[in-house]
Image: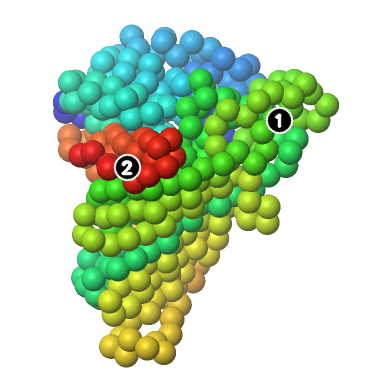
Amino acid sequence: MRGPVGDEVGIGVIGFGWMGRVHARAYARLRHHFPQLPLVPRLLVAADPAPDRLEAAERHGFERTTAAWRQLLDDPRVQAVSITVPNWLHREIGVAMARAGKHIWIEKPVGRDAGEAKAVAAAVAETGVQSTVGFNYRNVPAVAHARDLIGQGRIGAVTHARFRMLSDYAAHPAAARSWRFKRGESGSGVLGDLASHGVDLARHLLGEIDGVVADEAVFIPERPEPAAVPSHFAVARGGALGTVENEDYVGCLLRFSSGARASLEASRVSVGEQNNYGFEIHGTTGAVAWDFRHMGELRVCLGEAYQNQGFATVFVGPGHGVFEAFQPAAGIAMGYDDLKVVEAANFLQSVAQGTPCGPTIDDAVRAAVVLDAVSESVRTGSWARVPR
């Protein structure tokens, strides 16, 4: 399916919580950072059932708002849609929008399991619309530099790695029992929420994963019911307790097609850890390491000494990934929202050129297949093969 005629593309956003607002801000900033883009986004419609969120959408510059997302299906002016709703709605909305001919930028994990991600992917393939998925950590210039070094063989053949996605957003025992803790609405817990990012980073940097062995745990088995729709970090004191239906923690070992090995650990209840996301990757002659909390830095170990060979810190700058679209010199920090601006640029570039740019629905399917294998390993207590 070809992109829209002219230089303007009509945008709809479905779900206007925190992530919907991040998407809206990303569209608004596109012309600042990527003026060469052939398409200019026009914020047309925001859909959300909550009145306060629709008020926020009006402040973000949408021309109209609605409580009913289906109104976007028959609006010919809406050509591209951001889908930032809870997991249980991904499949229904993603399939419907693709079949209506709308290009989709959808947040991870895309549904509650691989089957739901595959359903959205099938609709995208049937209609020829473009898709982008919210694996934003790929867009970090330091991650791009690490991938270049690995691809150039600068650290030798990759032998082993560690990926971590540790957070404390649910560490409080009174954290509200939102949809994220209910299997029927979220599917998995920290697997879909954080480990999906870890799996995508692992695939992006090291290639396909062939097998996994894993364990998981629920450390806070009951949480208070919220009085209203809670935010991601809400604490609800005094409510009746409800059962936590999915995992707080997962740890697994990964085998890659290349022969490399890795560990992946994800937790939503890590006291003391605020968005401790990153990796350490070791090769036969060197290593690279990155920490999201120091987003503009890549720790690099290169040379031919093998032993007693230390790390140096590279402050990424122009020439590393998309850094120069945001800052003029190394050492000036980028932020999380900048990564979503890159996603928006990739999305509209794919719409304009009619071919994928950045992670697509197929990457979401691959990540979901790995996560399903993790769940299978937990169930059986043994290694699980990751099907192709």
Q: Position of residue 346 (x, y in %)?
A: 30, 43
Q: Is residue 151 something one can see in this rendering?
A: yes
342 and 214: which one is in front? 214
- Return the residue at label 1: 223
Q: Position of residue 176 (x, y in %)?
A: 70, 30
Q: Position of residue 331 (x, y in %)?
A: 49, 71
350 and 248: which one is in front? 248
Q: Residue at x 51, y 43 (%)?
A: 216
Amino acid type indicated by mark 2: Ala
Q: Earlier in the sequence, mark 2 or mark 1?
A: 1
Q: Position of residue 38 (x, y in %)?
A: 25, 40
360 and 348: which one is in front? 360
- Return the residue at label 2: 384
Q: Is residue 39 something one can see in this rendering?
A: no
Q: Is residue 39 placed above or below 286 in the rendered structure?
A: above
Q: Residue at x 21, y 59 (%)?
A: 258
